[in-house]
Amino acid sequence: MNSFFARKFVVQGIFISITIILLMRLFYIQVISDEYILSAENNVIRRLPIYPARGVILDRNKNILVQNEPVYDLMVIPREVKPFDTIEFCNLIGIDKTGFDRRFKRASSYSPYKASIFEKQLSVQVYASFQEKLSNFSGFFVQNRTVRRYPDSIAAHFLGYIGEVNQKVIENSKGFYTQGDYHGITGVERSYEELLRGQRGVQNLMVDALNRPKGNYADGKYDTVAVAGEHMISSLDKDLQKLGEQLMKNKIGSIVAIEPSTGEILSFVSSPGYDPNLMVGRQRGNNYMALLNDTYKPMFVRPIQAEYPPGSIFKVVNALVAQQFGSINENTYFFCPGGYRYGRQGFMGCTHVHGSIGLKGSITESCNTYYGYTYARMIDQAGMRPVNAYKKWRTAVSAFGIGTALGIDLPGERNGLLPEAEYYTKRFKNDKWGSPFTISLSIGQGELGITPLQMANVMAIVANRGFFYKPHLIKAIGDKNVIKEEYLKKNSAGIDPQYFDVIIDGMSAVVNQPSGTAWYSRIPEIEMCGKTGTVQNPHGKDHSVFVAFAPRENPKIAIAVVVENAGFGSTWSAPIASLMVEKYINKKINRPKAYMDRLMDANLLPGSAKVIRKPDKDSTNNKTVLTEAKVKSNE
């Protein structure tokens, strides 16, 4: 009996002890500690990321190229959703019932308890009407963010675009990115992502049972502030870029303009282009696929990714290298009977019978024969085996930035192609080959491949009489205007300054003398020095190429223009370049309107007739319509 009562008191004691412990713990949690407050109130506290404003990008004159615009992501917590009028909901945000079901299923699969994006990037207008009825839709709320806006709709390939991070990016970011974040995918947006993106903040909001914000939790004690991204001052001249894109409309090709004294890129045109605003907003995916499937490849960044045989513009490089080697000088003459004979039966034709012609004239009149002889002297008469002479020649050419990427601050730059000696040894099955085997290189044809950026850089070298700065698109970063040290380094092309004078004389005559191939493109009161090129294209009509710099003394701009499938360099590329040069130096164009209209209105797309789109009046309704007229060509 006593044993029974003893056990009874023991059991009662255990229960009383447990009750006291629980009460003490409850008192500690509710009265003494706030450790669990935030967790306990998860149903009424919403933790929102604060997305920073992405860094603004300006042109060289502080004009805005890219700015930010507010949008709103519609978020959902599936567990908290209660029945509502889905038809009204769908009409408010512009989706159908099928789309609603698909989005809700995706959100529920992600997590019934965590917030996820239901619909991205509602515009200000859509948000304004939706906000009024937000309380009708429990479980849904709106999160502020910004997207990019391009006020002038230019420079898409330079600026690039942003998009939502994928799982691989999240994993590689070491915790920086989370689902729903955006990052730079192409262009400057990608190259300078870490500076442009800024730093996220966090806001803890109290919400009531109707999903309405009721203020900051704990007066913002647990909030963190977002830090905006660094702004960028680009090297682009907005007005010059606009003109370049207008001139290249309905054409395939590139314009690259560089300031020789700094390496800053003044214009970066890839054509066909696209409106960068197409890569923003709820239709971005559809727009991207349409651009990706476009026959003319508007997403292809031609200035740094297209590789062309340079054609006659390469004669400038060979003329400089040959002088440096001592193979020729300004008084060297060769006889041109209309072509250059090599090997047993080889013949490389020339554009004319030039007769006896010197170095300056060979540039002005673009004599193929002269460069056949010059190349043969460098390879076959160099006092060494031709294969070793070729290696020496290749090293000298590569110092011009040919055959390797220049390191521009954009992703995806290609090296171009400057074949190694081993390539020809393998091709010809021995190393006893000489200049006849590679004679096409003398006039910039054959296996050479050069990007438009590399072409423009060669002109910067000539303008500087022997050196260049690394081409770049961002000239200063942030409020302190930080300039990367690599952009201040002077790079030598390995050619002594005295060898440039005769070449520049010849290039000046190309434009400014009636015998020059670009006489039609001369600019009143500006001495532009240039070189035309007509590049053989095995897949169709030849490409039109022109390179130049201006003015002759204290050059301010070096430029390369490529128009694919357009024929002679003098017909299309040279006039386009001359207008760009005139615009940049004079800030205006004084030549007749018809001169510009011919270039702007021409349709040179493959498979299209060359037409001028001229405004005309429809007599029936007095509205402006477009009519077509044939373009006269000098080809």
Image: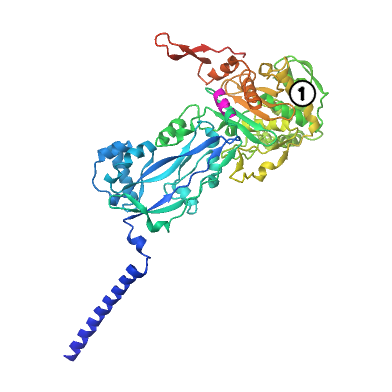
Label 1 crowd (10 A; few <14 / some 14-19 / many >=20) = some
Q: Position of residue 94 (x, y in %)?
A: 32, 35
Tell whether 252 sits left or right of 24: right
Instruction: State whether residue 344 appears in this view.
Output: no
Q: Amino acid at mark 1?
A: Asp
Q: Is residue 195 above or below residue 20?
A: above
What's the residue at 57%, 41% (across, down)? 232
Which residue is more in the foreground, 335 or 485? 485
Q: Residue at x 81, y 29 (%)?
A: 327
Rendering coords of residue 178 (x, y %): 44, 50
- What is the span of residues highlighted in magenta in the rendered image? 240-247
- Left or right of 131 on screen, residue 334: right
* Residue 512 in view: yes
Q: Is residue 518 above or below residue 52?
A: above
- Residue 3 vs residue 214: left or right? left
Work out whether 366 lies above or below 233.
Answer: above
Which x, y percent locates residue 268? 59, 31
495 left or right of 206 in image: right
- Secondary structure, mark 1, is helix
Residue that mark 1 sits on: 505
Q: Quadrant of residue 165?
A: top left
Residue 414 colored in magenta in the image: no
Looking at the image, which residue is at 30% across and 40% down?
A: 100
Q: Quadrant of the C terminus?
A: top right
